[in-house]
Image (tube, grey):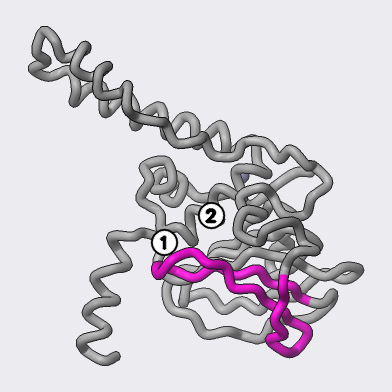
Amino acid sequence: MSIRHHVNDELLLAYAAGNLAESWSLAVATHLSLCPVCREREARFAAIGGVALEDIGGIAMSDNALADCLARLDGIVPDPPPALRDPTAAAVLPSPLRDYVGGDLDAVRWAMVGGGVQQRILPVGKVGQARLLRIKAGVAVPEHGHRGLELTLVLAGSFSDGEAEFRRGDIQMADEEVQHIPIAGYGEPCICLGVTDAPLVFRALLPRIVQRFAKI
Ligand SMILES: [Zn+2]
C-alpha cells in the first residue's frame, strides 16, 4: 500500500501540540495508524516540541528542581501513546476508529442519506463533525455545502475528485474555495471518514459563540 496524499504540516503540528479538536485529532490519528511516513514526521514534530520545552525549563532552575519534578511525576499516569500499529491488519477500520464504532465495519450502524450514500455520525464532542461515509461504487457524492475546512480520509475502495485518485489512507483536504464532486471508484463501495468545520479548538469556540448571539 502506498499512500500518496498525506496530512499537511499545519495539521500535524497542531496534532503533535495537542491543539486539534477531537474530530480532527481522530482523523490524523487514523491516518497515522496507516502511514509510517507521517508517524515519522509526527515523532520529529513532537521531538521539536520537547526541545522547546527543555529550553524554557533550563532557565533559573533551583537546586532541588529535579527532585521536585520527579516527586510530581510520581502521581502522574502518562497518556497511552497514539496507536502506531494496527494489530488486526485485516480490519477495515484502524484502531482509533474502532474505538468509536465499537468494532470493525460490521459494527457500524449506517443511516441512509440517499443517492447511494450512507453515513454514521461519530461522537466527537461539540467542535467539528466526524462521520463515516459509505458511497456506492461509481456514485458521485452530490455537492454538499460546507464552510471551513473539510478532510476526507479513504478507508476502503477509492474516490476521484477529477484531478487525483484517493485510496486507503489517502487524505483529501478541501475548503470552500474548492469545488469538488468526489466520485467513488468502480468495483467496491468507498468507505471514508469525513471531518468538517473547525480543526483547532481555539479557532472554533469564539466564532461559534459569536454566531449564537448574532443568530447567524
Ligand atoms: Zn501520511
At horizontal 14% and vertical 10% (from top left) the residue drawn is 64
Q: Label 1, on which residue? A: 199
Assign a secondary structure to mark 2: helix
Q: Amino acid at mark 2?
A: Leu
Report the side of 209 relative to 193 (left or right).
Answer: left
Assign a secondary structure to mark 1: loop
Place of residue 116 in the rendered image (x, y in percent of width and height, measured from the top left): 78, 84
Place of residue 6 in the rendered image (x, y in percent of width and height, measured from the top left): 59, 49
Q: Amino acid at mark 1?
A: Pro
Place of residue 163 in the rendered image (x, y in percent of width and height, measured from the top left): 68, 67
Q: Tell me if mark 1 has few (under 14), some (14-19) or many (20+) residues whose alpha carbon lies within 10 angstroms of its own.
A: many
**Which SS type dominates the magenta stretch?**
strand
Report the side of 190 relative to 85 (left or right).
Answer: right
* Region rendered in magenta: 109-135
Numbered badge on residue 210: none
At horizontal 62% and vertical 36% (from top left) the residue drawn is 84
Q: Tell me if mark 2 has few (under 14), some (14-19) or many (20+) residues whose alpha carbon lies within 10 angstroms of its own.
A: many
Q: Quadrant of residue 154?
A: bottom right
Q: Nearer the viewer, residue 71 or 156?
A: 71
Q: Label 2, on which residue? A: 26
At horizontal 59% and vertical 67% (from top left) the residue drawn is 194
